[in-house]
Amino acid sequence: MSERRIIPVSRLVGYVRSYLENDPVLTGVLVEGEISNLRQPYSGHWYFSLKDANASLSCVMFASSNRNVRFPVRNGMKVVVRGNVSVYPAQGTLQLVVNAMRESGIGDLYRQLELLKQKLSNEGLFDPAHKKPLPPYPMDIALVTGNNTAAREDVLITFAKRWPVAKITEYPCPVQGMDAAPKIIEALRKADQGNHQLILLVRGGGSIEDLWCFNDENLGRMIYAMNTPVITGIGHEIDFTIADFTADFRANTPTGAVEASTPDIHEVHQALENRLARMQAVVNRRMSVARQRYERSAAHPVMNYPERLISDQSMRLDYVRERLMKGADSVTYARSSFNDLASRLSHDMNAYTRQLHADIIENRMRMNHALSAEMSNEHNRLDALQKALLNNAAHGNEIARTRIARNSALLDAYSPLKVLGRGYGIVMHDEKSVRSVHDVNTGEEIVVRLADGRLRAGITGKEVTDEH
């Protein structure tokens, strides 16, 4: 088994679940199939399987979502559901969390949407890395929506309550019908050219046919290519469109788009007041410290009698001046003494040099005489040592010659070759002497060394004697 890091089951299942839930292709996916194994417990949640001829998928539809279903649901019914692919951690099984359900009949539209969503996702139009950051405090906002619609009124009212300081520029356009997409694209193009900080594209709830214009491929590509950040608030929470996937941020409703795009002015005002209070506290604290330092400085005697500082410095200058004058007199006296000393030293140096020269000549003559006598003595001593060394060397050579002759006789007497000359032989196996019958085995080859050569033989048998 490899030495890879070991992780618990829950962590692996959690990783798979996070990976599936963050995949835009598996978010808001539309699936058509037949309901089976439907369970509707008292909790209000629906548990069922969605199957076709080749596969089956576990599904859950929570009470908050299934209350919007307007037709009776039963086993065997063919439906189209919208949901997010996830994993049920307790069993580690794949499941579809359904948030919308419709009777089958508009399946062609759903299939078109799924194919387009897959195409744009493969091209990277849904990539989170491409999403533009939203400004924290936008002051110039463009609003693209229908004219005189409930969504427009909700957005403007929410702006007035939440962030009334922003300038809102409207770009009205149709937001319903098969021919609305080109007009929405044109309105977005104008808004993008208006140098706004943020663009809101909103529309109230409706059927899938009502919202189908927001699934236009050109509209999705337009939103992806825009320079200004775009927030969408289209339909209800369960409604997902191509415009939502390509936008920089998707809100669940038009009102949610306003809340996502702007801060609450009351919260901002409170934060500013808190910050102002902290700043005032810091200023007051620093002022208090500065005031204490000023009071301590003002209470110092120097501040009350500043002439003391000048008088002290003046006294120090007088003291230094006196020391400098005394120092100058000492330098003059020292210079005079130095000149006298130099004169005497020059006279004494000349006399000393003459005497030293005479002493050197006399000492040199004494050393030459002593050196000659010493060299003569050393020469005689060396001659004596040389004679003794020659005598010792001759005696040592004679002793060594005698020892070598004696050792040679011993070596000759104990030489294996002498033994071989008397008819004996040396048995070898693998370049080693055979000392026992146990050193070789039957069938192995041995070498018998004699005085005049070697014999090669094979072991045909072994006999062990009791002699030791």
Image (cartoon, rainbow, N blue to C red):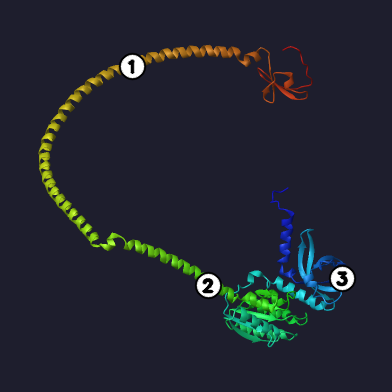
The foreground one among 241 and 345 is 241
The residue indicated by pointer 2 is: 273
Q: Nearer the viewer, mark 1 or mark 3?
A: 3
The residue indicated by pointer 1 is: 385
Q: N-terminal of the two: label 1 or label 2?
A: 2
Determine which quarter of the picture holds residue 294.
bottom left
Secondary element type, mark 1: helix
Q: Nearer the viewer, mark 1 or mark 2?
A: 2
Question: Where does the image place residue 59, in percent across and percent down from the top left?
Answer: 81, 66
Question: Where does the image place residue 458, in percent across and percent down from the top left?
Answer: 76, 23
The foreground one among 276 and 83 is 276
Q: Quadrant of the C terminus?
A: top right
Crowding at mark 2 (Cα within 10 Å: few <14, some 14-19, many 20+): few
Q: Residue at x 69, y 48 (%)?
A: 3
Residue 120 visible in the picture: yes
The residue indicated by pointer 3 is: 34
Q: Amino acid at mark 3?
A: Glu
Q: N-terminal of the two: label 2 or label 3?
A: 3
Q: Amino acid at mark 1?
A: Leu
Q: Residue at x 73, y 85 (%)?
A: 176
267 left or right of 463 in image: left
